[in-house]
Amino acid sequence: MGGCVAQVGYGYWGHNQARNLNTLAGRSWRYLVEPVAQRRAQAAALYPHLRTTDSLDEMLTAPDVVAVVIVTPAATHAPLARRVLDAGKHVLVEKPLALRTADAVDLTERAERAGLVLMVGHTFEFVPAIQRMRDFVVDGEVGDLLYLHAQRLNLGRIQQDINAFWSIGPHDVSIANYLTGADPQWVSARGARYLNQDVEDVIFVTVGYPGGVLAHMHVSWLDPTKTRRTTVVGSKRMLVYDDLDTEAKLRVFDKGADRLAADAYGAWQYRLRDGAMYAPALPMVEPLAAQLSHFLDCVHSGHKPRVDGWNGVRVVAALEAADASLRADGARTPVRLPAAAGRLDSEVR
């Protein structure tokens, strides 16, 4: 890679990123920036080769640092990434890329002007089951893509500064964009504030895509069971990805409703199809490791990452539209994407 890597943040998610950095980058991972002394001490005990510091400037001015991984609270993502890019370093930013579409666009354009890699931590695009679902959609194995349904529920982890959709919803928006191969067009969202009067802890979101495809998402910090499930319904087959299923992450169902000829009264008849289910074999891959490996490869090769800044812009724009819809009592709200983002080629069939 011709230089070393730094990580900023060693909190809740930073431990996981650090473990993978240590495995994939080894001694090339030389810096950890963390403002909390206790966390720095914990990291130093686990990774004694690291230079741990609370000074971002110290790391940014280090000439041997070529790439930075940001694993900090969401509100800090944009200002930290901007400083890293302005220092001439490649950057991987945890989701969401920013809290405003304008900031996400600014970061992406800065990276492009400087010829730097900007990648967003939409980890589920590196999950083998999700990638296999995408293959089923693109290859026409599901038939016409009709709708998606996602549930991301748990009792905790409750945040104070952002609502549940900003916290865990970026995963589901990213998955839906990836599976449909299309830009989100509009959002309708309803939610409630049961635990904190400042942010919604349970939210129901519907995102509209070209061709009438809908993606319905339910996110909550207040639910009795932990659920991480995405369902894809097509005209030929249905797919269910269950991240918590230890036996079969992905199940394929030969189920559907086939329209028959109209009866004597002119009413359409339907035949329900309840065929076999099977679980395709999937490689054993840790998505976070695959994501980090891809970032490091892009830094080394100069290639554009699969999950680039414009990918992040599309997700942030949908999240902003969801916020606007929440304020408008669920009104259908357009997703406003800048012309610079281009358009994804829809492969919905």
Image (tube, grey):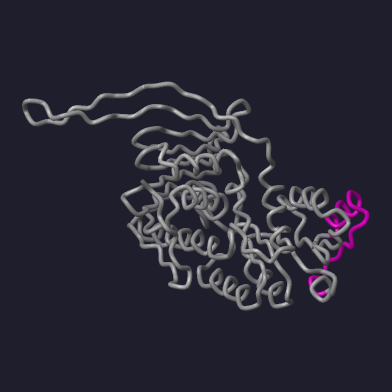
* Count of number-bearing discs: 0
Percent of width and height locating residue 324: 41, 62
Of the pair 133 and 61, the residue shown nearer to us: 133
Q: Is residue 116 above or below residue 134?
A: below
Determine whether, in the image, residue 346 is placed left or right of residue 84: left
The spot of residue 216 in percent (x, y) is 41, 45
Quadrant of the image occupied by residue 227? top right
Q: Position of residue 2 (x, y in %)?
A: 82, 66
Q: Residue at x 64, y 66 (%)?
A: 118
Q: Residue at x 71, y 50 (%)?
A: 13
Report whether 76 appears left or right of 222: right
Q: Quadrant of residue 145?
A: top left
Nearer-the-camera pick, 338 or 197: 338
The image quadrant of residue 49 is bottom right
Stretch of the chain drawn in magenta: 37-57
Determine whether, in the image, residue 284 is placed left or right of residue 15. Answer: left
Q: Residue furthest left?
A: 265
Residue 155 versus residue 121: which sits nearer the camera? 121
Q: Quadrant of the N terminus?
A: bottom right
Q: Position of residue 176 (x, y in %)?
A: 47, 49
**In the rendered image of this protein, does residue 278 appear above or below residue 163?**
above
Q: Residue at horizontal 71%, vertical 63%? A: 301
Foreground of the two, 313 or 203: 313
Q: Is residue 189 magenta?
A: no
